[in-house]
Image (spheres, helix red, strand yellow):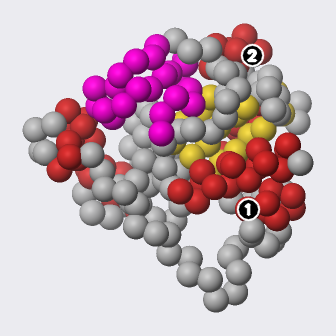
């Protein structure tokens, strides 16, 4: 993640990015997934394995899988590019003179359309038009009701918070079973702390 100096300082990360020299870059072991993650007949496992090619070892780097066009999956990008997309959304749909979405579409993207207990994830979730709202333990990014975005495979996290004028994206270099990387949530907390300072 590329951080503004104040956010980097609040997170304890040198402003140029990266960890302290000699620091262990390995994250702590994430909590165990819910029991349903190990039950091959559970809705969670059936949903995650609906496209077997995506679950195969090494799939995240397989050119054939990367060429698939699957809605809500197979996005290949980096944090900087993803943050620019969300920056346009946080700014009402336009960035640097390029209109990505109309203001009405951005408003719909931040308006809750469905919420309740998620049968697949096993916890309460809320969704807007194509985006997740911050209502789950693994997508707790903002208290602002206009915020929206989505966690991704292996700990990726991105969102727009139009009220705070924030766009945030965090991507990983490896896959894990975690919904969201604890490092991403720590950086999100640091960004909001820096804004409050």
Residue sitting farthest toward the bottom = 22
Q: Does the magenta segment cover residue 133?
A: yes
Residue at screen point 51% across, 65% down: 173
Instruction: Name the residue: 78% across, 38% down.
Output: 166
Specify few, some or many for label 2: CA neighbours under 10 Å numbering under 14, 14-19, or 20 or more.
few
State whether residue 100 is above or below residue 83: above
Residue 153 at x, y percent in the picture: 43, 49
Which residue carries the number 1 mark? 11
Give the image location of residue 121, x and y in percent: 33, 34
Segment colored magenta: 114-137
**On the image, numbered disc 2 is attached to which residue?**
102
Query: Do callouts 2 and 1 mark residues in contact (Cβ within 8 Å)?
Result: no
Q: State the predominant SS element of the stretch in magenta.
A: loop
* Residue 54 visible in the current orientation: yes
Q: Where is residue 33 in the image (x, y as percent from the top left)?
A: 30, 51
- The magenta stretch spans residue 167: no
Query: Which class describes the residues within 10 Å of circle 1: few (<14), some (14-19), or many (20+)?
Result: many
Q: Answer yes or no: is residue 84 visible.
A: no
Quadrant showing the N terminus: bottom right
Q: What element carries label 2?
A: loop
Give 182 or 67, whichever is nearer the viewer: 182
Judged from the image, the secondary structure of the residue bearing numbered disc 1 is helix
At a point 13% along the width and 45% down the height, the residue shown is 39
Residue 162 lies in what quarter of the image? Answer: top right
């Amino acid at each position: 993640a590329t951080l503004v100096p104040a956010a980097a300082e609040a997170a304890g990360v040198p402003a140029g990015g990266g960890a302290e020299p000699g620091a262990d870059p390995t994250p702590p072991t994430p909590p165990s997934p819910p029991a349903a993650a190990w039950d091959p007949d559970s809705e969670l496992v059936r949903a995650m394995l609906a496209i077997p090619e995506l679950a195969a070892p090494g799939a995240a780097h397989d050119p054939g899988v990367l060429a698939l066009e699957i809605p809500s999956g197979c996005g290949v990008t980096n944090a900087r590019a993803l943050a620019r997309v969300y920056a346009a959304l946080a700014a009402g749909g336009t960035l640097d003179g390029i209109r990505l979405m109309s203001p009405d579409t951005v408003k719909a993207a931040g308006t809750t359309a469905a919420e309740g207990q998620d049968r697949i994830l096993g916890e309460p979730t809320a969704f807007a038009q194509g985006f997740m709202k911050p209502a789950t333990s693994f997508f707790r990014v903002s208290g602002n009701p206009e915020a929206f975005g989505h966690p991704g495979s292996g700990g990726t996290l991105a969102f727009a918070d139009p009220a705070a004028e924030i766009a945030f994206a965090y991507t990983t270099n490896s896959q894990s079973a975690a919904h969201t990387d604890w490092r991403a949530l720590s950086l999100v907390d640091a960004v909001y702390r820096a804004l409050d300072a």
